Image: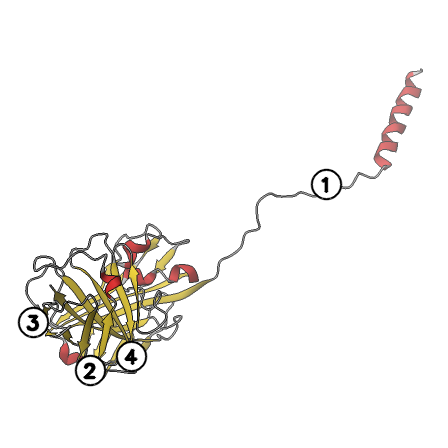
Amino acid sequence: MPLALALWAAAGGACEREARPDPPAEPIVSSRPPLTRVPRQRAAAVTIRFANADVEPGADDLGYDHLRVAAVFADATREDAALLGDLVGQNPRTRDVPVTDQCVRQPGPRHLAQERGSTPSGYVQLLDIGNLRLRAGAEAVALKVQMVPSLFSAVRGVRYDGDVDHARHLLAAGHLVLDATGGDGVAAFEASIEVPRPVRITHVGSTPVRRGRAELTDPETDVSIRWGSVDHAASLELEVGAEASGGQDWVRCRLTDDGAFTIPGGLLERLPPRTAEQPWLLALYRWRAASIPGFAGEPLRLELVDTIRVH
């Protein structure tokens, strides 16, 4: 073929190929699920706990009427917000005991952080909300700011703490007020909670409680307790377990606040035998909860606690 003809044929073929439409592109299909943004919220957990003449595990002396405050405020997912109670020593009140005058055996260690052993599903940022105080009438207790203990690797930020001995007079105000100056995008706030009536265990079986101790001499396996005041506006719970329980079981009961309750003996069978050297601890909690402006739920909890040893 002459060279000119060959060049023309090649050019014509190229023009013909350029004129043809390209085939439709195949859609790109990804095996990865679409990214979703997990909603976050402002959450908090505040525990105000007053203990009658503390009978702390392992302590021989009564100590002093003691008020302890622990508080955290966070930006977290709704799922992780439930973990904030671990950081301020909140037990899972009524979670496993939905009906009053019933008890459950709580397997394993008593404290929630040990019991659950869970970690956040995302990142939890604990907020610095400025100066935080607890007020009782004209008296105010400034809370200290400290870095939160490293319970979880995904939790960062600060916790507020306060301790007051000889604190019974603070309850006389009738209301406690928590106020903050604001910070980390949180506006200044003020939250109030009513103080429940004082709580004291007066008898275990037929034996009166003396200086935080009682000897259980009744032959029956069921254990009855009595307390000296009632408060129908608050919630009431009882915990029973060995003082040096380790990983052993505890018993938790949700009570009608009517002054008396009997713990079924079958629930106490797994507890170690009580002795003078290793008594049982009975802790009676009367508590209320309240809301905090700008935070979900009722994260402010005030607990009055009476703890005794039973051998």
Which kind of residue does numbered mark 3 sit on? Arg
Q: Where is residue 9 in the image (x, y as percent from the top left)?
A: 91, 24
Q: In which quarter of the image is residue 95?
A: bottom left
**Disc on res. 306:** none
Distance Cα–Cα, label 1 vs label 4: 66 Å
Residue designated by label 1 = 26
Discs 4/3, front: 3
Discs 2/4, front: 2
- The reply to whether the C-beta atoms of the residues labelled 1 and 4 are less than 8 Å apart is no
Decide if residue 171 is on the left or right side of residue 38: left
- Where disc 3 sits, the SS reads loop
Q: Earlier in the sequence, mark 1 or mark 4?
A: 1
The residue that appears at 54% across and 52% down in the rendered structure is: 35
Residue designated by label 2 = 229
Decide if residue 243 is on the left or right side of residue 231: left
- Where disc 2 sits, the SS reads loop
Residue 89 in view = no
Label 2 Cα neighbours within 10 Å, binned few <14 / some 14-19 / many ≥20: some
Q: Which of marks 1 and 3 is nearer the N terminus?
A: 1
Residue designated by label 4 = 234
Decide if residue 297 is on the left or right side of residue 108: right
Residue designated by label 3 = 211
Q: Where is residue 309 in the image (x, y as percent from the top left)?
A: 12, 65
Q: Which of 212 and 55 is in front in this view?
A: 212
In this view, 22 is above or below 214? above
Distance Cα–Cα, label 1 vs label 2: 77 Å
Q: Nearer the viewer, residue 243 or 119?
A: 243
In this view, 283 is above or below 260? above
